[in-house]
Image: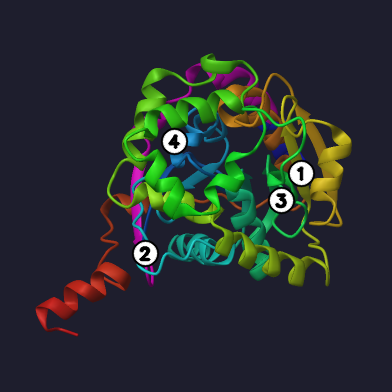
Amino acid sequence: MRFFQLALASLASVVAATSSFDTWAHGRVALQDVSIHFRYAGSGPPLLLVHGNPQHSLTWQFIGPILAQNYTVIAPDNRGAGDSSVPPDGNYTAAASAEDLKGVLDFLNITSAYVFAHDKGVGMATALAIKYPDLVKRLALAEYVLPGFTYEQSSNPAPFWDLYQNWQLAFFQVPDLAEFLMSGKEKQFLQWYFYHGSYSGVESFSEETVNRYTSSISKPGFLRAMLGPFSSSTVYQDGNFFKAALNESRLSVPLLGMGGEASLGLKSVLKQTFEPVSSELEIDVIPKAGHWVADENPKWTAKRVAKFFGEDDDSLSKVDLGYLDDLVTLDVGFYGTRRNFALGTQ
């Protein structure tokens, strides 16, 4: 509790002095089938940030530096996003991504962490808590309905549908078609997507930020990778996974479920969304935000997340990642195995 009080006091006084996300250190870990890139900064208990789609770790460019004042923050790029690699088998299920997150934490020798996830990252973080409950000390989730728990219904046509509804979720279910129609129009797609889900419209994302996301999904294979978690096959597998796990027993990890006031922001909706996930639930509405909560209201969101994690009576120990500065990380695993095979050493 003392850490919580100190954290809030610190957050209130240092927001203006936070470092730029672009100055954060880079890390990369080679796993069985992918290479996961991550950014990290700060000093304190470990906090894992899990982004959604169509974004990557840049999601946390505003909220991350605020949280890094009191936490050791780790922000991976999910498989097929940002500077992580594209999986050769095209597996973008929440369970597969959860293994990536575990791989990053294992590599960093972190046995338990606070986790905050947004959008598609919610499914990945929830899968991590299901498969490895001891790894997740507290879980904060924002702006996502799990497959198997009404996600599928959100793309069903309704009489009131227009460009502001979630018709794109149905469009994305057939990646071959979506990729064909979106290729060469990545920026126009992102501009509409960010505008359509926001509280304040086009002001929510700067031109530079949109350009950076455009550059990311325009790389060979990355537009298809961005669509992978939305495919009908992935959603079907995710739905079966979550129903099998959560219908049997909800998580016991403390959970904070949040939504932007212009999106999932009704408390009744948030309760319906997150109550099936955990038996220990808090909910809150993020003011002045739509779907993109980390971009639209990072200060409020950082303060609320810090409050929730700070309520942990048995807070996690401080983690120092400074040792990574001089560490070779790609001598084993996916890239290491390929290199060693080519050299005839394996």
Q: Residues within 10 Å of mark 3 (few under 14, many from 20)?
A: some
46 part of magenta stretch: no
Q: Which residue is mark 1?
A: 256
**Res. 45 in view:** no
Question: Which callout, 1 or 3, points to the residue nearer the camera?
Answer: 3
Q: Could you give the CA–CA distance between mark 1 and mark 4, rounded to whole angstroms?
A: 22 Å
Left or right side of 229 for 19: left
Can you give x and y, in whole percent of width and height, for residue 43 in the image? 50, 41
> Mark 2 or 4 closer to N-term?
2
Magenta-highlighted residues: 8-34
Q: Amino acid at mark 3?
A: Tyr
Toward the viewer: 107 or 238?
A: 238
Q: Which residue is mark 4?
A: 58
Residue kind at label 2, given as amino acid type: Val
Question: Where's residue 48, x and y in %?
Answer: 55, 49
Identify the mark nearer the N-term, 1 or 2: 2
Is residue 30 on the magenta stretch?
A: yes
Residue 256 picture quarter: top right
Q: Judging from the image, what secondary structure is the residue with disc 2 in? A: loop
Label 2 vs 3, first from the N-terminus: 2
User: What residue occupies the far left of the structure in this picture?
Assistant: 343
Of 17 and 31, nearer the camera is 31
* Whether residue 66 is situated above or below residue 86 in the rendered picture: above
Which of the two labelled residues, at mark 4 and mark 3, occupies the earlier sequence position? 4
